[in-house]
Amino acid sequence: MNDFHKSVLLREVLEGLRVKENEKYIDATLGGGGHSLEILKKGGKVLGIDCDSEAIEFVSGRWKIETKKLSIAEENLILVRGNFRDIDKIAHLNNFDLVSGIIFDLGVSSHQIDEPTRGFSFQNEGPLDMRMDQELGVKALDLIRILTKGELCEIFTKFGEESRAWEISDAIVRTRSIRPIETTSDLVRVITEALKVKRLNSDFSKADLSKKVFQGLRIIVNDELNALEEALPKAVKLLKQGGRIGVISFHSLEDRIVKRSFIEFEKKGLGKIITKKPITPSSEELKMNKRVRSAKLRIFETRSASPG
Ligand SMILES: C[S@@+](CC[C@H](N)C(=O)[O-])C[C@H]1O[C@@H](n2cnc3c(N)ncnc32)[C@H](O)[C@@H]1O
């Protein structure tokens, strides 16, 4: 749809959800609306959810233009600002509690990364924010200011999978006792110094060292893994018989939750796993968009009515 976000695994999601005319779908992670728009073009009706007010505003503006261009009824898309951990309540309030498909495209949008004021990027100077939902109370800055060395270390190890978490946490605690760490660049500097990296020849390699620490902070600020773990069992209950849920994840912590939840659903007799191995981007998509490198799509289908 846009520069706001380049959608990942678009064809694979449409095929995977077997999108049909007049059926209802939930896009639990609206972002720039790329997946939603393709479902709408195929005649589906969409409930789009995002916790980021900028995503809702962007898609609602674009939707006014697209409806005219494509002659699709405006009411085929309902937009709700909310957290997908409340998917059951949001669906119920909007009469979407029996749907044919649900898509979760996890993580942050390109807009969130590229907009320095959101504080997600280790490559641009910005405040240490990292909240997807601007109404959340705690920013990354608060974690950096308040948490103990041990707590920071645990976050970087568990949620960033950073092997040198202790050195980095130690450097943060030492630095903040001398001067405040307030921006993304301040934090990148502390990490680079802590790892004693010499002669880095590009900003990218310097920033890249911070990737895992930023991932860890982002997961905690947005409580990402708990939200996913809570949402999936609620989502599967919203599906019609033979309905499908697709989840695109971007790192092993997310993928593990999706894989484990789908196995659990299968054990409970709720349906079957469609993707024994996750679907990954084609070489053409990889060439066009390097952010998709780690994307994995898993699909689960609910049980169909038994014959007779
Ligand atoms: C990768 S983007 C989705 C892109 C979208 N599929 C597209 O094609 O444009 C992920 C979006 O999900 C939102 N998001 C992440 N976690 C969320 C949650 N727990 N509840 C609601 N929205 C969430 C983010 O704010 C972001 O806009």
Image (cartoon, helix red, strand yellow):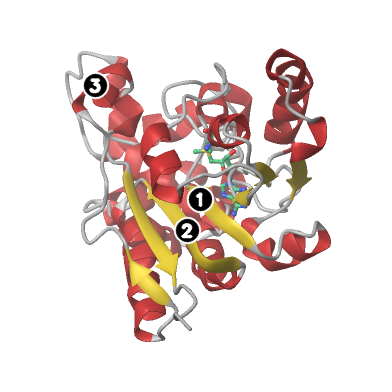
Residue 261, position as x, y percentages in the image: 40, 72
Q: Tell which of 146 and 184 is nearer to you.
A: 184
Q: Nearer the viewer, residue 170 or 307?
A: 307
Q: Is mark 1 within 8 Å of ligand 1?
A: no
Q: CA distance from mark 2 to mark 1?
A: 8 Å
> In the image shown, does 59 or 38 lie closer to the viewer?
38
Tag 1 residue: 104
Residue 159 visible in the shown view: no
- Marks 2 and 1 in Cβ contact (< 8 Å): yes
Residue at numbered disc 2: 245
Tell me what residue is drawn at x 30 percent, y 20 percent. 204
Question: What type is the residue that disc 3 sits on?
Answer: Glu
Could you tell me which secondary element the residue under label 3 belongs to? helix
Residue under the point 56% across and 63% down = 227
Q: Which residue is mark 3?
A: 284
Q: Mark 2 or mark 3, which has the lower sequence index?
A: 2
Under mark 1, the amino acid is Phe
Identity of the residue drawn at 61% across and 42% down = 21
Residue located 57% across and 66% down the image: 239
Q: Nearer the viewer, residue 162 or 69?
A: 69
Quadrant of residue 99 within the rendered picture: bottom right
- Counting from the top left corner in percent of width and height, residue 40 is at 63, 34
Work out whether 253 lies above or below 144: below
